[in-house]
Image (cartoon, rainbow, N blue to C red):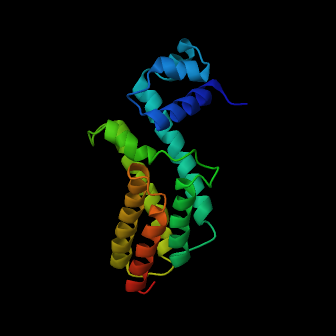
């Protein structure tokens, strides 16, 4: 059974991800969740607290999904698996993530543009943790820390670019295109 706090967070996440943070008011979250206003404010003193909880909710779900998709592979195979996972997400072939509406963390950080805002910082931390997962997978084929970091940075730029291209331009093949470029990068460093 889902408790009321989790019910609020899930309903808020669905609305925020689909429609945006500032476009969704607290009353709409209450209406969609079926939770009373008093209960909402018992768990979340303000809307920013609810937004932070949705960011943490998505962060945990996304990392679990990514770790599952990459768990049995390393090195070049992990990079292929990363872009294949993105391709499945963009094209609605993975039930672990909701239908694709771009990157929740990019979307939220755009609405909370001040890099010092706590919600923006949560989004940035998510990106760092995703990169850390990929960094561990790259260690299987590279023993040079400098090369690993350069390759990681390029792969993360490709990943983020593919997400934006898929969402903004509607290019549902963006992950596969990024995978082709990633393979060239891997070959260039002998991975």
* Residue 6 in the image: above or below residue 185: above
Residue at image point 33% right, 36% down: 111
Q: Nearer the viewer, residue 94 or 143?
A: 94
Q: Position of residue 173 (x, y in %)?
A: 48, 62
Q: Quadrant of residue 85?
A: bottom right
Residue at image point 53% right, 72% down: 80
Q: Position of residue 78 (x, y in %)?
A: 54, 71
* Residue 168 in the image: above or below residue 66: above
Examine the rendering and report whether any part of residue 189 can be seen.
Answer: no
* Residue 73 in the image: above or below residue 127: below
Looking at this view, name the residue that lies furthest to the bottom.
190
Residue at image point 44% right, 28% down: 49
Q: Quadrant of residue 147?
A: bottom left
Number of numbered discs on residues: 0
Residue at image point 44% right, 69% down: 177
Looking at this view, name the residue that lies furthest to the right.
1
Q: Position of residue 81 (x, y in %)?
A: 56, 68
Examine the rendering and report whether any part of residue 65 can be seen.
Answer: yes
């Amino acid at each position: 059974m889902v408790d009321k706090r989790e019910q609020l967070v899930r309903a808020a996440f669905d609305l925020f991800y689909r429609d945006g943070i500032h476009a969704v008011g607290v009353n709409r979250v209450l209406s969609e969740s079926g939770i009373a206003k008093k209960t909402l404010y018992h768990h979340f003193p303000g809307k920013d607290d609810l937004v932070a909880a949705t960011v943490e909710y998505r962060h945990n779900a996304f990392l679990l999904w990514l770790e599952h998709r990459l768990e049995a592979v390393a090195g070049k195979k992990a990079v292929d698996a990363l872009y294949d996972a993105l391709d499945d997400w963009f094209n609605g072939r993975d039930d672990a993530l909701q239908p694709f509406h771009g990157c929740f963390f990019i979307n939220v950080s755009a609405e909370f543009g001040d890099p010092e805002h706590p919600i923006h910082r949560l989004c940035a931390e998510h990106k760092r943790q995703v990169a850390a997962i990929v960094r561990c997978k790259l260690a299987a084929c590279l023993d040079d820390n400098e090369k690993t970091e350069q390759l990681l940075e390029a792969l993360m730029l490709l990943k983020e670019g593919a997400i934006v291209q898929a969402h903004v331009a509607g290019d549902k093949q963006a992950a596969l295109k990024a995978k082709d470029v990633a393979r060239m990068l891997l070959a260039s460093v002998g991975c």
